[in-house]
Image (cartoon, rainbow, N blue to C red):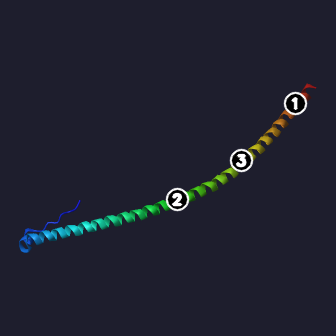
Amino acid sequence: MPVTAKLSQRFYERLGEDFANELVDWFNQVDAAYRADLRELNELNFARFDAKLEQRVAELRAELHAGLAAHGAKLDVFRAEMLRGMADLRAELLRWAFLFWVTTLGALYAFTR
């Protein structure tokens, strides 16, 4: 969307139609050239930004995977400890239950004699 430069009527009267039109065309060409250069520069900057962003996302993903692996290992250790603790608790409860029933049967035997 080029912006067409237009000079005042006084320029046209002083410089003449042809020269003023050439000057307007030159301004428009310079404007178009600067716009094209700016667009190219913006595209290059965006490409660099996009490459850096992709690199940082890849680094973040690698860090995240490493962190998750470390936490997964810790979770496996915790799970093993919990299972061992639950097995110990089960053994303890079975001992107490056996003691309870032996005591109960002993008391019943004593009372029935």
At label 3, counting other C-alpha atoms closer than 10 Å, the crowd grade (few under 14, some 14-19, many 20 or more) is few
Rounded to the nearest whole Å, what is the CA distance between mark 2 and mark 3? 35 Å
**Residue 89 at what x, y percent from top left?**
76, 43
Rounded to the nearest whole Å, what is the CA distance between mark 1 and mark 2? 69 Å
Q: Residue at x 46, y 61 (%)?
A: 53
Q: Please tell me which of labels 2 and 3 falls first in the chain.
A: 2
Write down the residue under mark 2. Answer: 58
Q: Secondary structure at mark 2?
A: helix
Write down the residue under mark 3. Answer: 82
Q: Amino acid at mark 1?
A: Leu
- Residue placed most toward the observer, 45 or 111: 45
Residue 97 position by quadrant: top right
In the rendered image, the vertical position of residue 26 relative to residue 110, given as above or below: below
Report if the CB atoms under discs 3 and 1 are less than 8 Å apart: no
Q: Please tell me which of labels 1 and 2 falls first in the chain.
A: 2
Q: Please tell me which of labels 3 and 1 falls first in the chain.
A: 3
Q: Secondary structure at mark 1?
A: helix
**Residue 99 at what x, y percent from top left?**
85, 37
At label 1, counting other C-alpha atoms closer than 10 Å, the crowd grade (few under 14, some 14-19, many 20 or more) is few
Report if the CB atoms under discs 2 and 3 are less than 8 Å apart: no
Q: Residue at x 29, y 65 (%)?
A: 36
Pair 3/1: label in front: 3
Write down the residue under mark 1. Answer: 105
Pair 1/2: label in front: 2
Quadrant in which the C terminus is drawn: top right
Q: Residue at x 19, y 69 (%)?
A: 27
At label 2, counting other C-alpha atoms closer than 10 Å, the crowd grade (few under 14, some 14-19, many 20 or more) is few
Q: Amino acid at mark 3?
A: Met
**Residue 86 at what x, y percent from top left?**
74, 44
**Residue 25 at what x, y percent from top left?**
17, 68
